[in-house]
Image (cartoon, helix red, strand yellow):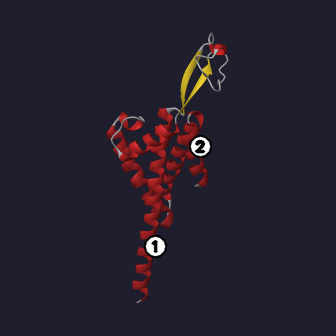
Amino acid sequence: MIFFLALGIASLRNGGLIASISVVCNFVFVAGIAVVAFVGADKAKAFSIGFLVPVVLYSSALSFGGEDEFYAYRGDFPSTQAIGFGYRNAVRTVWIDRNTGDVIPDFDRSDPRYRNRSVREEKLPDPKGYMIAGQMFIAVFLGISGGKLACIVFDRHNTIQIESNTA
């Protein structure tokens, strides 16, 4: 779990390849949970089903919300607005030399050193990757919460069942 938390935070901070790796790891994790929901037993099965229900519901709601839910400056869901707020506070502009691909620190167009250089502006982290990783992060958080709740209900149900059998 700590691995997924660290990977999620790193993907939000850096985007790009790390965000892609984070999304793939989360898909593999959710697929593993789905397998346990079908073939697992007892508490593992309860956690898995409890995990999958909010993940599927949240993902379905996002798909009905449309592509706007994956843009930092659009979207109606409170989660999208919260992730967008995080993006607007995390985004930074870097200037990259088109010839070398190097980042130019402290770029200033009026500086004579940069007058004849081909330079492009880039926003980091990538807004689309940030939003996808953020939505995935929220889906997994909701899933873990649902799984924990399912385990509590499972334990309580078994405790009541054991007490009624011993009476």
Classify mark 2: helix, strand or loop: helix
Can residue 21 be seen from the camera position used here? no
Horizontal side of 16 relative to 142 (left or right) equals: right
Across and down, in percent, residue 9 comes to: 56, 46
Instruction: Name the residue type under label 1.
Output: Asp
Across and down, in percent, residue 39 comes to: 49, 58
Residue at numbered disc 1: 155
Residue at numbered disc 2: 10
Image quadrant where residue 115 sits: top right
Above or below 164: residue 109: above
Figure quadrant of the C terminus: bottom left
Instruction: Name the residue type under label 2.
Output: Ala
Query: Around disc 1, counting alpha carbons within 10 Å, would you say few (fewer than 14), some (14 to 19), or many (20 or more)?
Result: some
The front one of 10 and 117 is 117
Q: Residue at x 45, y 69 (%)?
A: 152
Circle nearer the N terminus (1, 2)? 2
